[in-house]
Amino acid sequence: MIPRHVGRNPAGARAERSGGEGTAAPLVPAQPTLKRLREAARTCRACPLWARATQTVFGLGRPEAKVMMVGEQPGFEEDRGGTPFIGPAGRLLDKALDQAGIARQEVYVTNVVKHFKWESKGQQHLHKKPNASEIAACRPWLEAELQVVKPQVLVCLGATAAQALLGKDFRVSRQRGAWLDSPLAPQVLATVHPSSILRAPDDDARHEQMAQFVADLKKVAAAIRRLR
């Protein structure tokens, strides 16, 4: 079960300020709420990503949200704004949710990694995929979010999120849109990250990929209706 780190007590002053060596577990409050988690995560130094990021970008949504959607990491706009899924991929996600008939207030959005990992190319800050140790260090925050929200439907957006939560051998290309057995939530589904749609080579491909993404989300919408 995923909540194996939650509830540990802080270990020493350094851990209270920044997290432990290679894990954020010491920072997680013993009785977490989303507000407490968000405040505690602000000072997380469990992996090196904090040093080049503007701020921690924690999850957003109501604790009673029926759906949790998990992506890879915040991007440039999220890093500056402090809110997940507000950049181009987030705006596309909002559009897809609307087309699928899912109310935004029913969704809690977050990322596997809470700091923006990037490399420079001229004046640009380009996304760089987090590695296994960075994902592991940040995992206690995601575990705590799952514990608090207790989503009825968990949606992994993209390969990094799916492999972090469902195992390193999981392949979105083979198993996207299928309901999966998992202890993480009553219903679990993986699909692509909306950023992959933005990288489509042309308008026709982008339109087709968007249609497939919306089709996956319509399965989530149907699951929500069954819960009412």
Image: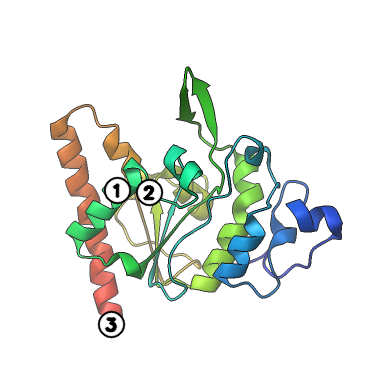
Q: Position of residue 225 (x, y in %)?
A: 24, 76
The disc labelled 1 sits on which kind of residue?
A: Arg
Quadrant location of residue 30?
Answer: bottom right
Task: Please give the name of the residue rendered at 38% of the width and 49% of the height, measured from the top-left corner.
Answer: 86
What is the number of the mark on residue 228? 3
Q: Mark 3 or 1, which is nearer the eye?
A: 1
Contact, CB < 8 Å: mark 1 with mark 2? yes
Q: Is residue 10 left or right of residue 184?
A: right
What is the number of the mark on residue 86? 2
Q: Mark 2 or 3, which is nearer the eye?
A: 2
Q: Position of residue 145 (x, y in %)?
A: 54, 65
Of the numbered discs 1 and 2, the one sitting upstream in the chain is 2
Q: In what element is the residue under mark 2?
A: loop
Of the numbered discs 3 and 1, the one sitting upstream in the chain is 1
CA–CA distance in space, label 2 to label 3: 28 Å
Work out whether residue 121 or residue 174 is closer to the camera in this orientation and state it.
121
Examine the rendering and report whether any part of residue 2 can be seen. Answer: no
